[in-house]
Amino acid sequence: MAGTRPIPTPLWKAAALSGMASYLDAGLIVSISVNLAIYRDSYDMGVWMAGAISAIVTGCIAVGSLVGGRLADLFGRRRVYNWDIFCFALGAIVITLAPDDITLLIGVLVAGLAAGADLPTSLAVVSDAAPSWARGRLIAFTQVMWMLGITVAIFLGFVLSTTGMTGARLITGQLAVAALVTWALRSRLKLSAEHDTAEPATEAAPQRVALKKIWTRAALLPMTATFVFYVTWGLGANTFGQFGTYLLVTVSDASQSLATGINLAFIPIGVLLTFAFVRVADSPWRDRLFHVAAVVQILAFVIASLTAGALVGMLVFFVLYQLSNPFAGEANYKVWSQLTLPADTRGTTQGLTYALSRGVFAVAAFFTPALADHSPSVLLWTITACMTVAAFAGVFIIRVLVRRTTGAVRDRADLRVPST
């Protein structure tokens, strides 16, 4: 079966290094979330300033995705792939050393733009190198890195919850170190034509893909469908990614230590199930499990909404969410995008869906603290409605778009990698 065929080690290495884009993206968003209450007290922020910081990090990721994906298609994906992560490191250093909220915003601006640029670029690099029979697992593995980014940030937030700004600086400092190490390793990454030698990788001369190719039916339909899924699912996931700790403290009346502890306690479930998703990502079970997980995910948000964010309801929510999210979330979006979007415009088209979605998330993040303060129930029911729309969008992608790609002509990666 295609899903059990061994994948060459160099491809796993490429997937891991590309997955650092997801690690750093998640780590940046969650570290801001974990540190937000600390920043608020240290810099004397109001609810609107707290919302602005979260909106800026998400907005910058959106802009970075749009620009970075296009630059990668124009000037070479490996070139952009190597340098955007270095820029992220610079931004993370500024955040870590920021003496005031203005400097913090500058660091968030730089790191957010770089993180956004790396997301579609790194996925395109993996897709270019991977044969179709391995693409699902390799792309899904980047989601494992995303979960690890969340886990490390929340774990450090829990351990350092009583250390104030010192702990906040350590949480963002590890992102800078991770980015610099990844930059050094990416610069030496080797992928030969057959993926089984140590010859240096070479990238074909970049082809300047005309923007008009994005607006063809072949690109527009899957781009629109994956966008609808990602933006509606992401409104819920991004809200709890950025404001999970904040909501537990301000709405559920949990302490900073308890709030970070709750997040940390349930994350191992998500990590283990994300590994499980990787195993089925190239098999029919990937899309079969989506239907069940999507229903459970909606149920999780319904319970949170019915209890208006009460601590007991939030505990049930976190259990159900971590059980369902790995099989009905961003990992699906990543795999579906690479399977359904045209190969020559993957960087640009996925960058566009990332950018538009993160732009919506940024606007939502700006208003979230104020809306949570006004009515937690309204906030949670709105998210529940979005999750329902995402479920229907996912079913459309599975039954229409993915089905069309089954049995399609093999791409250039298939021709480079031996099938035995």
Image: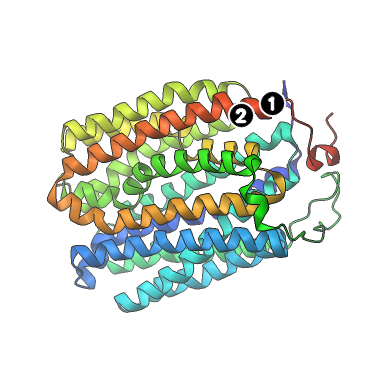
Secondary structure of the residue carrying tag 2 is helix
Residue 294 in percent (x, y) is at 41, 27
Q: Looking at the picture, which amino acid does disc 2 mark?
A: Val
Picture colour scheme: rainbow
Q: Is residue 286 visible?
A: no
Q: Looking at the picture, which amino acid does disc 1 mark?
A: Thr
Q: Quadrant of the C terminus?
A: top right
User: Mark 2 = which residue?
Assistant: 402
Question: Quadrant of the rendered structure where residue 266 is?
Answer: top left
Residue nearest the viewer, comparing 265 with 251: 251
Horizontal side, residue 85 vs residue 203: left or right: left
Residue nearest the viewer, comparing 416 with 208: 208
Residue 40 in percent (x, y) is at 22, 66
Residue 253 in percent (x, y) is at 14, 47
Residue nearest the viewer, comparing 260 with 113: 113
Q: Quadrant of the N terminus?
A: top right
Q: Residue at x 65, y 40 (%)?
A: 218
Question: Quadrant of the rendered structure where residue 337 is?
Answer: top right
Horizontal side, residue 146 vs residue 133: left or right: left
Question: Quadrant of the rendered structure where residue 408 is?
Answer: top right
Q: Residue at x 69, y 26 (%)?
A: 406
Q: How dense is the environment of label 2, judged by Cα within 10 Å: few (below 14), some, or many (20 and up)?
A: some
Q: Are marks 1 and 2 in contact (CB under 8 Å)?
A: yes
Residue 338 in percent (x, y) is at 63, 41
Q: Residue at x 72, y 31 (%)?
A: 133
Q: Is residue 294 visible?
A: yes
Image height of 290 relative to 96, above or below: above
Secondary structure of the residue carrying tag 1 is loop
User: Mark 1 = which residue?
Assistant: 406
